[in-house]
Image (cartoon, grey):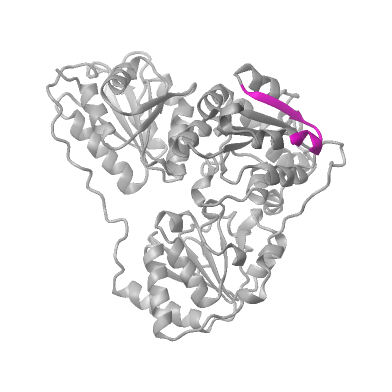
């Protein structure tokens, strides 16, 4: 006889291969059923927030629908920051949790539905008669709206016997590419005429363009217009012709590349929200640039947008290529006069900073030279996020994963590694984190080492401070004490859970990374580099933030 938990697990198993979680009273029967009766791999992490983070990273790295699980009460409340991040990042995720019994709350129960709603996640509660159907509805909601849902199993319902698992319907999902209507088609024709006469066309793409599968049509559009291209931080690598690509826009971009973008006369943006960092706080485009945004959002997402086309990025790009062909348009030739590679070069920095510690720029350059080409970079939040984005290019957008930045949080880095590692098992997973976020996430250092093994590498930018706060508030004269962190030996912490740790004080110490990268993954351990970097070198994007806040 099957139980309610069996019904839930069978419905979930029809759509996923991996579940991440922490076991407790509220999800014990669910996990028992998952382990015994399905093909799904369960990966344990050490903190409930880490369960959601690992599932989120697994989705972002191309692993499909994300599923995490925790117990009720404290187990659930521990997930809230990670759940809020997944909401902000539009990650389709199902969080399976225990919940108060149907007889009413116990002293340790809280209103989990209200808490989930407060961060933007909807809750579905299974019952004795509808467990499988409710699970399918929760999955359907997550995939349709690209948002986390919470699937709650009341404590006194989880092990009730309810008969065989019924035939499960497939979730009803909207078409991934809604066809363009007549207004959008007319807008395409108008935009094609604009691009046909543009002298300096520029194309910018974000993660939405990647999700729509727009790489090939965007490449053909760039060829047809002779446009220079660039991407957002989460869209890097979306354009196929790297020789004409300026890299990432905003504060992560090279200064000369950003100057060139300001000279564009027409800029078309595909699948990017144009947030403050991408837009350099409004300074990305010159006032005379005609900016057109192509997105599935209801309306333009930045006041500098002069024209808006609501459409799927891939369909719009294909339609623009066809419209330009009808006009017999010829490429502008602008990109042939531009040395994109030279313009995209970043400041190499100095060997050591003025205080004798590592210059993070030169360390980032050297690490970028040594990292395996198949890398997937997962990033925590903090001042250091600029270095990986500026100096460690990746092949495709699903290889640069920034869990935490959507919600402006830190401390989600180590738990991202298991999710990315299982989604990309043949790649090298590289974590970039700060000492503040690294300490906050320390519970899942063990998870990262255990799951990624010799395919995993962590780089800790250890400046003995909460760098972003020092840069923003220390310069204003606020007390520095709360912004500082005592010297922590992350290398020894890594060794305690089975990794190899190296304290890096000079660029020569990075020779160990060279040897590690040259060794087959089966013959090496997870490597953690504890970079003793200077806090006196401020990332360019942070300088923009300081300027705005001043």
Magenta segment boundaries in residue numbering: 499-511
Residue 245 shows in this picture: yes
* Residue 510 vs residue 72, the one in the foreground: 510
User: Which residue is at the front of the view, 50 or 220?
Assistant: 220
Residue 494 position (above or below residue 94): above
- Farthest bottom residue in view: 328
Q: In this view, does 173 lie to the left or right of 78?
A: left
Q: Compared to 396, does 331 lie above or below? A: below
Identify the residue at horizontal 65%, vertical 37% (top origin): 517
Let me know if residue 153 is in the magenta part: no
Percent x, y for residue 463? 75, 34
Q: Where is residue 289 drawn, in percent x and y?
A: 58, 74
Residue 510 position (above or below residue 101): below
Magenta stretch: residue 504 in it? yes
Residue 150 occupies quadrant: top left
* The quadrant where residue 115 appears: top left
Locate the N terminus and report the quarter of the image it occupies: top left
* Image point (67%, 33%), residue name: 516
Does residue 136 sit above or below 213 in this rendering?
above
Q: Can residue 300 be seen in this view?
A: no
- Rendered location of residue 161, percent (x, y): 16, 17
Left or right, 447 with reference to 500:
left
């Amino acid at each position: 006889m099957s139980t309610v938990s069996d019904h839930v697990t069978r419905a979930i198993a029809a759509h996923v291969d991996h579940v991440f979680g922490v076991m407790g009273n509220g999800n014990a029967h669910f996990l028992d059923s998952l382990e015994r009766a399905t093909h799904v791999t369960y990966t344990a992490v050490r903190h409930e927030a880490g369960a959601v983070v690992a599932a989120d990273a697994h989705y972002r790295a191309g692993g499909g629908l994300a599923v995490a699980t925790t117990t009720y009460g404290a187990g659930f409340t521990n997930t809230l920051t990670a759940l809020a991040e997944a909401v902000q990042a539009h990650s389709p995720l199902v969080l399976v949790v225990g919940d108060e019994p149907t007889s009413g709350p116990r002293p340790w129960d809280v209103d989990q539905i209200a808490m989930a709603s407060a961060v933007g996640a909807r809750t579905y509660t299974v019952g004795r008669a509808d467990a499988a159907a409710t699970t399918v509805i929760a999955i359907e909601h997550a995939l349709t709206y690209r948002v986390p849902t919470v699937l709650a199993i009341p404590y006194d319902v989880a092990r009730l016997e309810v008969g065989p698992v019924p035939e499960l319907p497939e979730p009803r999902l909207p078409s991934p590419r809604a066809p363009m209507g007549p207004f959008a088609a007319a807008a395409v024709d108008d935009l094609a005429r604009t691009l046909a006469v543009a002298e300096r066309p520029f194309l910018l793409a974000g993660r939405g363009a990647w999700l729509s599968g727009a790489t090939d049509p965007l490449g053909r559009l760039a060829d047809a217009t002779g446009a220079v291209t660039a991407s957002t931080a989460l869209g890097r690598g979306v354009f196929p012709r790297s020789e004409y690509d300026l890299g990432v826009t905003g504060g992560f971009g090279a200064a000369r590349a950003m100057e060139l973008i300001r000279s564009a006369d027409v800029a078309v943006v595909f699948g990017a929200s144009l947030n403050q960092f991408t837009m350099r706080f409004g300074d990305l485009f010159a006032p005379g640039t005609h900016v057109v945004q192509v997105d599935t959002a209801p309306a333009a997402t930045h006041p500098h947008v002069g024209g808006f086309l609501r459409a799927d990025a891939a369909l719009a790009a294909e339609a623009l290529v066809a419209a330009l062909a009808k006009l017999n348009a010829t490429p502008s030739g602008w990109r042939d006069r531009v040395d994109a590679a030279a313009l995209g070069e970043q400041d190499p920095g100095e060997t050591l900073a003025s205080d004798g510690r590592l210059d993070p720029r030169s360390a980032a350059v050297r690490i970028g030279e040594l990292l395996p080409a198949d890398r997937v970079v997962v990033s925590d939040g903090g001042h250091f996020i600029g270095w990986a984005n500026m100096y460690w290019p990746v092949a495709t957008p699903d290889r640069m994963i920034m869990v935490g930045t959507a919600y402006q949080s830190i401390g989600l880095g180590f738990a991202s590694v298991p999710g990315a590692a299982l989604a990309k098992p043949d790649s090298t997973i590289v974590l970039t984190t700060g000492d503040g976020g690294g300490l906050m996430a320390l519970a899942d250092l063990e998870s990262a080492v255990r799951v990624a093994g010799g395919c995993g590498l962590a780089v800790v930018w250890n400046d003995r401070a909460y760098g972003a706060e020092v840069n923003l508030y220390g310069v204003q004269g606020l007390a520095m004490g709360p912004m500082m962190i005592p010297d922590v030996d992350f290398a020894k912490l890594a060794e305690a859970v089975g990794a190899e740790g190296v304290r890096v004080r000079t660029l020569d110490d990075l020779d160990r990374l060279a040897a590690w990268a040259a060794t087959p993954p089966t013959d090496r351990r997870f490597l953690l580099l504890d970079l003793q970097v200077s806090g006196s070198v401020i990332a360019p994007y942070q300088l923009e933030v300081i300027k705005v806040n001043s």
